[in-house]
Each structure stands twice: as structure tokens, then as C-alpha cells.
Amino acid sequence: MANPTIAIVGRPNVGKSTIFNRIAGERISIVEDTPGVTRDRIYATGEWLGREFSIIDTGGIDLSDEPFMEQIKHQAEIAIEEADVIVFVASGREGVTDADELVAKILYRSNKPVILAVNKVDNPEMRNEIYEFYSLGLGDPFPISGSHGLGIGDVLDEAVKHFSTEIEEEDADTIKFSLIGRPNVGKSSLINAILGEDRVIVSEIEGTTRDAIDTRFESENGQKFLMIDTAGMRKRGKVYESTEKYSVMRAMRAIERSDIVLMVLNAEEGIREQDKKVAGYAHEAGRGIIIVVNKWDTIEKETNTMRDFEEEIREEFRYLDYAPIIFVSAVTKQRLNKLPELIELVSMNQNLRIPSALLNDVVMDAIAINPTPTDKGKRLKVFYGTQVAIKPPTFVIFVNEEELMHFSYARFLENQIRKAFTFEGTPIKIIPRRRK
């Protein structure tokens, strides 16, 4: 089930990004220093009162070619389209402005829960100055201070009240996957081609993500799939469909709901920076990844054309060295019949559990090949390892000092585990933990 989404909206310079960072907290910090994994502060996850949620900073969506008031209007429309709850931020220092009134009118007609947060109320005396905000017709204004963290909890308390309590039943046997990629890489054509490959379409249901159509189908061997159609996520949004950050945001919504992500590249255009950005999100989220090179029928082939393209992908996506690559054509159906079985393979690897005895044999053999490193005269000691989770497979390695487990040695252990057990298509995580 997708997390509920809070969108932060308001005119510039009211402190939206500060509030966004406050709510996101540690979840937005850089955890892994991996080349090619670019983080964008427009979208993050947060948690309050035990409820996880997604959060969108609409102020980070670049609509700079729009006039000032039109830009604010479009960002409000994005919030309405994407959010379950909207936090409308105004400034207690400037009072109610024309731009605030414009946003309030748009939000008032949205039929979405709107929480009015009056920011920059940094001391108790200023609370008496927020009453004019009742004129916006959005209920009680919440006085907050993003810079000091005051009142944020009250806003989140109110937001959580509006989260749905319905629990979507998950079918453990169904593999959920999505196709992500830049516009015009051929996602829609691939989706249509996949569904036309003698599959049995079971049902079409309205997706949790706005305007997406989730399609359930079965392969010939009876495996159930749920395809999350990101290509269909368009409304009146052509005005902002062209903005890179907005398309990245929508890809992240799809990643959040998927078990496996098909990263679609356009063979004609090659690899772009946005491809690496979106793939980085899927990697960090621990999703299974398959790199799909579409429009392969349009490329003039020489002896090593495919090999050269694959080498370029491996160079640009170094952190995805575990992801299988498949070259397809939505037009000619080339290799499309192999996609479902490749998705099944990655799903099986995501759910693979390794017995502790086997895992420790591999770890000890690895240490024999490459002894543990020392730091300032102190040697890393590895006692034993155990698998603690799947999707992605996660291993805790018990050691004498966590700080002695350098990233490069953890990477070495990961490579040895992959040699022994494959794990093609899925990231794996290694967590060093001090033995008590």
C-alpha cells in the first residue's frame, strides 16, 4: 500500500523548504556515498505517530518560465493532484497577501484536507497577529516556526487525522512492477506490447497514485503480476509534465509502490543524467532493478554494438552492476517474451533466504582470500553473519568494532556473497554490528 502524501504549498519565501526539511528530518540525510546517486529535495519520506508518509515540496518544482502568479497557481494544482493532505504555508510577518488569497481559492475548491500553517511566528507575542488569516476561509491557522521547529508537531497531528485507515490487502504471490524513465523512452508502447503478448488481463483497477491505471495480468505459467502504469499518469498536467523535477517525483511515487523497477532507456538517445537520478532512487529504496533498452530495432548494428552499449551502461550505472540488461523493441516485440521470466527471476532473488551456516562458510572463505583490514593498529574481527530481511536481502555481520568495517571491505564481502548466491537484479545490504 502506498504511503499517504503531504504536499507543502505556498508562495515563495514563506519557509516551505525549511518546514519540508524539518518534517523529513534524518530521512533526507545522505546515507550512502555512491557515484551517480543524486538526491533531490523535492520528495522525501517522514514519520509521525507511527505513520509513514511521503512529503512533497512543491516550491522545488521549477516553473521559472511562468509568470509569478501563474507559477504559484500551477504549484498549488500539483499539490491538489498529488496529495492526500495539503499544508498551505503563509508568513506571519507579511500577513495575508494577494498570492495567499489566490492559493487559498484554488485549495478551497480542491475537496482535499487543507491545513493552514502560518510560519515565522517565532515568539508568543506574534501569535496575536495571525487572526487575519481566518479571512482565507481555511479554518484555524496553526502558528509555527520552521527555523525553530515550533508548532510542526501540531500540524503533523492534524495531518495524521486525515490519513486513510483502510488497509489495502496485499497478495503475497503477486509481483508488483513499474516502468520508469524519461518521457519519450517508449514506456507506453512497452506496456501495450507487454499486455499484448498473449497475457490474460484479469482486471484494471484505479491505482493508489492519481490517474494511474494498475493492470493485473498472469503469465502463461500462472504467475500474477501487477503493472503500475507510470506512463498513464497525466492529467491536465501537460503544463508541468515537461519539468524534470515533476517527472522525477512521479517516478518516485511509482518506485515506492513497486517490488521491481524496469528502468527504461532509449537506445536512440543513450543515457541522460535524469536516467541516473531516477535509477539511483530505485537503488536506494532497495527495489529490484532491470535495465530495459527500448527501440533497439532502430539502431544500426555492427559486430559489437550491443556489447559496447552494455559497457557504457555499466560505466554510467556503476552502482547497478547487479542489474540485468535486456535490449528490446516495443514495435517488433523483440525479446519482450523474456521480460516476465526475468521479472520472476529478480523477484525470486529478492526473496531468497540464505541459511546462516552457508552464509558463514562464504564469509570465512572471503576472509581467507582477503584478510580483514587494520586501522591505527586495530584489526577488524568478523565473528559471524546472519540474514535478517528480504526485499532487499539484508545481512548483519557481527564484528568487534563497527567503525573498522570500511565501505570497501563491506563491498568486498557483498561481492563474495553475490558470487556464491547470485542475487541478480536485487541490491543487498550489509550492516556491521558490534557483538555484545
Image (cartoon, helix red, strand yellow):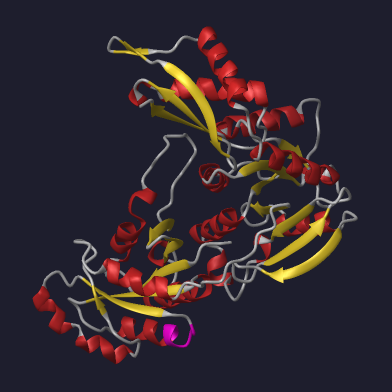
Location of residue 38 in the rendering, given as x and y in whole percent from the top left corner: 46, 44
Quadrant location of residue 416? top right
Tell me where the magenta segment starts and ends, as one range: 106-111
The image quadrant of residue 169 is bottom right
Above or below, 76 against 329 in this view is below
Q: Is residue 61 visible?
A: no
Most extreme residue toward the left is: 125
Is residue 108 within the magenta segment? Answer: yes
Q: Is residue 273 above or below residue 215?
A: above
| x and y, in percent, of residue 70 in the image | 43, 77
The N terminus - image quarter: bottom right
Position in image of residue 234 (x %, y %): 63, 69
Q: Horizontally, is 69 left or right of 145 in the view?
A: right
The answer to whether 83 appears left or right of 206 in the picture is: left
**Total marks placed:** 0
Q: Residue at x 29, y 9 (%)?
A: 377
Residue depicted at 59% across the width and 45% down the height:
287
Residue displayed at 47% across by 34% down: 35
Q: Is residue 172 magenta?
A: no
Position of 319 relative to 338 (above/below): above
- Image coordinates for residue 372, horizontal then vertical, percent: 43, 13
Q: Quadrant of the C terminus?
A: top left
Q: Is residue 153 visible?
A: yes
